[in-house]
Image (spheres, helix red, strand yellow):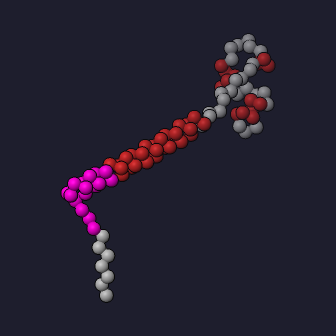
Amino acid sequence: MRLPDEQLRAGHIPADVYRQIPPGTNVHKVVIVQEAPRSYKGPIVLTLVTTIGAVTVLIVLAFVVKVIAAAAVAVISASGGISYTLNRSKHK
């Protein structure tokens, strides 16, 4: 019995708990309630939701910037303010 939970399962009362029991109490009828182990499900789900939300916002933002840039280039080139050509000359 090296761990405290092994002692509690075997029915032994640790000294620090034993000192807190009022005098005259029948120690054979003392029930020790242990705290439940911590659940990590909540923080993990919160991290996943935050990450997925951030990625979604970045993808939507990139799409909106792409649409705005394409519209701006189309308007400027249609009005004659900007033009670009592809020159595929063959030099030997």
Q: Position of residue 25 (x, y in %)?
A: 74, 13
Depth order, front residue of 49/17: 49
| Place of residue 28 in the rendered image (x, y in percent of width and height, measured from the top left) | 79, 19
In front here: 75 or 42? 75
Direction from residue 13 to residue 82 in the image, left or right: left
**74 relative to 5, above or below:** below
Q: Position of residue 45 (x, y in %)?
A: 56, 38
90, above or below 62, in the image: below
Q: Residue furthest top?
A: 24
Q: Is residue 87 magenta?
A: no
Is 73 covered by the magenta stretch?
Answer: yes
- The x, y position of residue 76, in whole percent, is 24, 54
Q: Is residue 11 above or below residue 58?
A: above
Q: Is residue 58 above or below residue 77?
A: above
Q: Between residues 77 and 53, which one lies in front from this camera angle?
A: 77
Give the image quarter of residue 37. top right
Residue 15 visible at all: no
Q: Over which residues does the magenta segment extend?
A: 70-85
Q: Residue at x 68, y 14 (%)?
A: 22
Quadrant including the C terminus: bottom left
Which of the 4 quarters of the picture holds residue 24?
top right
